[in-house]
Amino acid sequence: GAGVSQSPSNKVTEKGKDVELRCDPISGHTALYWYRQRLGQGLEFLIYFQGNSAPDKSGLPSDRFSAERTGESVSTLTIQRTQQEDSAVYLCASSFRGDEKLFFGSGTQLSVL
Amino acid sequence: QKEVEQNSGPLSVPEGAIASLNCTYSDRVSQSFFWYRQYSGKSPELIMSIYSNGDKEDGRFTAQLNKASQYVSLLIRDSQPSDSATYLCAVKTGTASKLTFGTGTRLQVTL
């Protein structure tokens, strides 16, 4: 596609429910990042995928968070048993071979009631 | 100590003035430095990258890097109201895969 695509753009869920967020990177981009941005805050690194290498999961805040990526394509971020503090914008970005210029998607606004 | 630190602002400058945005980082082996601009409600976009000590100019933007002081800055000359946004400093360490962002500085350019 022309850019990084994220879905859904907005998600409202009840505390305790599981949610799945999707990211479709730019075709040919081998690197994919997930970041979280709380209201008025900076970007918090969650996880990084590069090709077929083991992902860098060092930013995942708890075992409720997990992410998968199929080859060099779509990635899903799953949050289990959501909590109110999980409310944030979840941003996905991709880059070419780990080149540092990241292209960001428009994000998923997650609201946990 | 945060890995990448920025003043949150807001930094207010009049139209036509020079805006100076600053960033410090903690890891001495960091090698790559970036400035992203984020308009309210939008996603970040890359505006400058710098890898070696000194200045790098691109139009009205100049990035400055001082590795000895672990300091990187962004100067915006002839500031315009359209420059009003949050500017995020990002750092990549050679052995790490992730790009670490600061919390951003909100810039307001006033008429």
Image (cartoon, grey):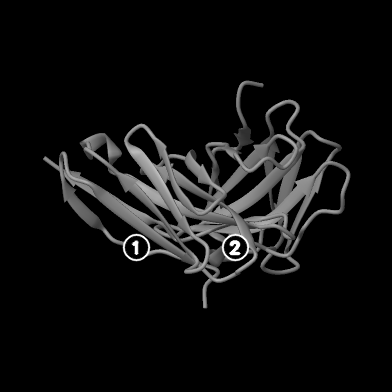
Q: Is residue A111 visible?
A: no
Query: Could you tell me which residue is drawn at 19 percent across and 53 percent down?
Result: B12
* Residue B71 locus on image (x, y percent): 45, 63
Residue plotted at (71% across, 49% down): A77
Quadrant in the rendering for residue A65: bottom right
The chain letter for the residue carrying disc 2 is A
In which quadrant of the rendered image does the C terminus of chain B lie? top left
List x then y, in percent, for residue A17.
67, 58
The answer to which of B24 and A57 lies nearer the viewer is B24
Could you tell me which residue is drawn at 26 percent across and 41 percent down? B77
- Mark 1: amino acid: Ser
Q: Nearer the viewer, mark 2 or mark 1?
A: 1
Q: Residue furthest top?
A: A2
Query: In the rendered image, which residue does mark 1 sit on?
Result: B8
Residue type at numbered disc 2:
Lys
Q: Residues within 10 Å of mark 1 (few under 14, many from 20)?
A: some
How many residues crowd around disc 2 within 10 Å: few (fewer than 14), some, or many (20 or more)? some
Q: Position of residue B72 (x, y in %)?
A: 45, 58
- Are the residues under badges 2 and 1 in a single subunit? no
At 27% from the left edge and 35% from the top edge, which residue is drawn? B82
Residue nearer the viewer, B61 or A49 = B61
- Vertical side of A77 occupied by A6: above or below: above
Residue B38 placement (x, y as % from top left): 41, 44
Secondary structure under tag 2 reads loop
Q: Which mark is residue A15?
A: 2
